[in-house]
C-alpha cells in the first residue's frame, strides 16, 4: 500500500518517469476506456429513441422526458461524490460497483414491463455511468507521466467523441429493425464482458483513505446540484412553458443548496474531510479550464439539441438520415484525438486551444446562415468544422486543467469537471431552447408558417450560441502548460 501511495503522490513514478507505461498500467487504462465507451454509447442511443419509447409505452412527452431528466438528475447527484469515492474505495472495487450497477440497470431496462420500471433502470444505469469518466480521468492523471498525458488523453477523446457519433446511427438501425428493447440487449453483453475483464485485470491505483463521508454534504449536494439540473432541464424540455412556480422553486432550492454546500466544503477541507475539495480552484489554470469547459459544453449540448430540430422540422430529414449526417463529424473528432494528444505533448495547450476555439466559433457563426432552403452539404460542413475545433479544445482543457492541481486532488478535479459539465449542459439547453421558443412565438404572432417559425427560432438560438463561443477564444490565451512538479500545493 505504501508503494501505491507513492504512485498517487508521484504519478511519474508509475510509469518510470517519462518512459513508456508498464503493461499493468496500459491494461488498467485500456479496460477503463472500453467501459467508459460502453456507458457513453448507452447514453447517446437513448436520446434518439425517446419518441419511439413514448409511443410504445403510451406516455405523454412530459412524462417520457423523465427518461432523460432522471438520468441527468442521477448523474448530477452522483458525480460530485465521485471525488470522495475514488479516494475512499480501491480502484478495482469502485470499477466493479460502477459496471455492476450499469449492467444491472441495462438488464432491467431490457426486460422492463412498463415506464416506471424502465425509469428506475435508467436511474441505476446513471449511477454507474456517473462514476466511470471521473474514475478514468483520475487513473490516467495518476499513472501517466506529464510528458505523455496529452497522447493518452487523446485516446480518451476518441471514446468521448466516437460513442456519441455512432450512437444515433446505431439507435436508428436497432429501432427500425428490432425494437427499442434491443438497444439494451446490444449493450448488455459488452458491459458484462468489460465488467468480468476489469475484475480480472484491473489493479488498485493509489492508496485509499478511511475518512467518513459527511452526510450533510451529501444532502446539500443533492439539493444543490439536483435542484439546478432539474430546474434547468425542465426549462429546456418545456421551452419555458412549464409551471413557473415549480421551475423557480427548483432553481431557488438549487442555488440555496449549492451555496450551503460550497460553504460547508470550505470548512471541511481544512481538515481534509470535504466531499468535494474546492482547493483545486486555487490553480488559475484549472479555474480557467473549468470555465472554458462549461462554456463549450453549454454551447455544444445546446447546439446538439437544436440541430436535430432544424434537420427534422425544417429540412424534413428522417431520424436515421440525421444520424448518418452527424456520423462523419464524430468519427473525424475521434481520428483527430491521438493527433491532438501528440501535438499537446509537443507544443502545449495554448497552441491548440486558440485555433480550436476559433474553429468552434466560426462553425457556430456559420449556422446563423442556415435557412429553410439550406443544403445538406452546408450542414455537413458546419458539423465537420465544429468537430475539428472541439477535437483541438477538449484534450488540452482536460489535460492542462487537471495537470495544474496537486496530485492528491486529481479525483476532486475530475469530479468538478464532470459536475460542472452537467450543469453547463443543462444551462445551455435551457438557454438556447428558451431563445428558440420566444423567437418562434414572435414569428407565429406575425403569421409565419410553422417551418418559418422553427427556422427563425433556431436561427435566433444559434446567434446566441455563436456569440457565447467568442468568449472561449479569449479564455484560450490564459491557459498555460504546467511543467512536471510545478503544481500548487493545497494547505
Image (tube, grey):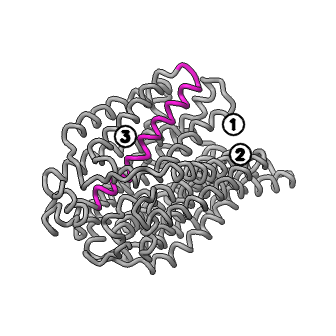
- Residue 99, horizontal then vertical, whole percent: 35, 38
Dot 1 falls on a residue whose secondary structure is helix
State whether residue 142 is above or below residue 59: below
Can residue 116 be seen at all in this image of the molecule? yes
Q: Which mark is residue 98?
A: 3
Q: Which residues are magenta?
A: 113-141
Q: In terms of image quadrants, where is residue 237? A: top right
Separation of marks 2 and 3 at Cα, in angstroms: 32 Å
Residue drawn at x 54%, y 34% is 49
Q: Main secondary structure of the magenta part?
A: helix
Is residue 120 inside the magenta stretch?
A: yes
Circle 1/circle 3 CB separation < 8 Å: no
Neighbours of disc 3 within 10 Å: few (<14), some (14-19), many (20+): many
Q: Which residue is mark 2?
A: 238
Can residue 177 be seen at all in this image of the molecule? no
Q: In terms of image quadrants, where is residue 428? A: bottom right
Amino acid at each position: 500500500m505504501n508503494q501505491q501511495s507513492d504512485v498517487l503522490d508521484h504519478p511519474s513514478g508509475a510509469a518510470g518517469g517519462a518512459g513508456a507505461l508498464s503493461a499493468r498500467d496500459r491494461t488498467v487504462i485500456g479496460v477503463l476506456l472500453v467501459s467508459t465507451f460502453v456507458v457513453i454509447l448507452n447514453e447517446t442511443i437513448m436520446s434518439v429513441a425517446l419518441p419511439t419509447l413514448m409511443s410504445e409505452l403510451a406516455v405523454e412527452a412530459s412524462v417520457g422526458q423523465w427518461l432523460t431528466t432522471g438520468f441527468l438528475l442521477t448523474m448530477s447527484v452522483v458525480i460530485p461524490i465521485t471525488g470522495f469515492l475514488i479516494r475512499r474505495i480501491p480502484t478495482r472495487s469502485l470499477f466493479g460497483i460502477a459496471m455492476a450497477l450499469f449492467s444491472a440497470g441495462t438488464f432491467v431496462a431490457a426486460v422492463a414491463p412498463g415506464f416506471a420500471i424502465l425509469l428506475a433502470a435508467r436511474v441505476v444505469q446513471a449511477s454507474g455511468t456517473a462514476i466511470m469518466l471521473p474514475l478514468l480521468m483520475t487513473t490516467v492523471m495518476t499513472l501517466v507521466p506529464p510528458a505523455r498525458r496529452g497522447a493518452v488523453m487523446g485516446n480518451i477523446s476518441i471514446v468521448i467523441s466516437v460513442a456519441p457519433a455512432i450512437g444515433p446511427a446505431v439507435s436508428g438501425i436497432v429501432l427500425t429493425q428490432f425494437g427499442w428493447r434491443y438497444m439494451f440487449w446490444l449493450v448488455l453483453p459488452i458491459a458484462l464482458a468489460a465488467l468480468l475483464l476489469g475484475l480480472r485485470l484491473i489493479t488498485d491505483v493509489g492508496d485509499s483513505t478511511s475518512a467518513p463521508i459527511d452526510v450533510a454534504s451529501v444532502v446539500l449536494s443533492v439539493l444543490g446540484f439536483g435542484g439546478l439540473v432539474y430546474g434547468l432541464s425542465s426549462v429546456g424540455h418545456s421551452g419555458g412553458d412549464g409551471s413557473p412556480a415549480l421551475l423557480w422553486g427548483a432553481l431557488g432550492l438549487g442555488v440555496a443548496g449549492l451555496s450551503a454546500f460550497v460553504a460547508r466544503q470550505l470548512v471541511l477541507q481544512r481538515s481534509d474531510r470535504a466531499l468535494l475539495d474546492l482547493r483545486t480552484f486555487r490553480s488559475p489554470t484549472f479555474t480557467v479550464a473549468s470555465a472554458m469547459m462549461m462554456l463549450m459544453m453549454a454551447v455544444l449540448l445546446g447546439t446538439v439539441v437544436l440541430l436535430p430540430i432544424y434537420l427534422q422540422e425544417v429540412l424534413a430529414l428522417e431520424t436515421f438520415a440525421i444520424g448518418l449526417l452527424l456520423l462523419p463529424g464524430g468519427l473525424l473528432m475521434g481520428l483527430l484525438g491521438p493527433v491532438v494528444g501528440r501535438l499537446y505533448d509537443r507544443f502545449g495547450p495554448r497552441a491548440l486551444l486558440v485555433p480550436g476555439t476559433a474553429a468552434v466559433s466560426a462553425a457556430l457563426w456559420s449556422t446563423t446562415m442556415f435557412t429553410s432552403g439550406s443544403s445538406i452539404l452546408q450542414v455537413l460542413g458546419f458539423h465537420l468544422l465544429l468537430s475539428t475545433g472541439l477535437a483541438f479544445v477538449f484534450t488540452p482543457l482536460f489535460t492542462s486543467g487537471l495537470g495544474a492541481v496537486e496530485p492528491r486532488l486529481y479525483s476532486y478535479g475530475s469530479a468538478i469537471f464532470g459536475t460542472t459539465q452537467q450543469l453547463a449542459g443543462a444551462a445551455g439547453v435551457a438557454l438556447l431552447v428558451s431563445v428558440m421558443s420566444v423567437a418562434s412565438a414572435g414569428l407565429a404572432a406575425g403569421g409565419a408558417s410553422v417551418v418559418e417559425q422553427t427556422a427563425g427560432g433556431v436561427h435566433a438560438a444559434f446567434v446566441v450560441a455563436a456569440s457565447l463561443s467568442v468568449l472561449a477564444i479569449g479564455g484560450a490565451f490564459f491557459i498555460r502548460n504546467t511543467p512536471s512538479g510545478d503544481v500548487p500545493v493545497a494547505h
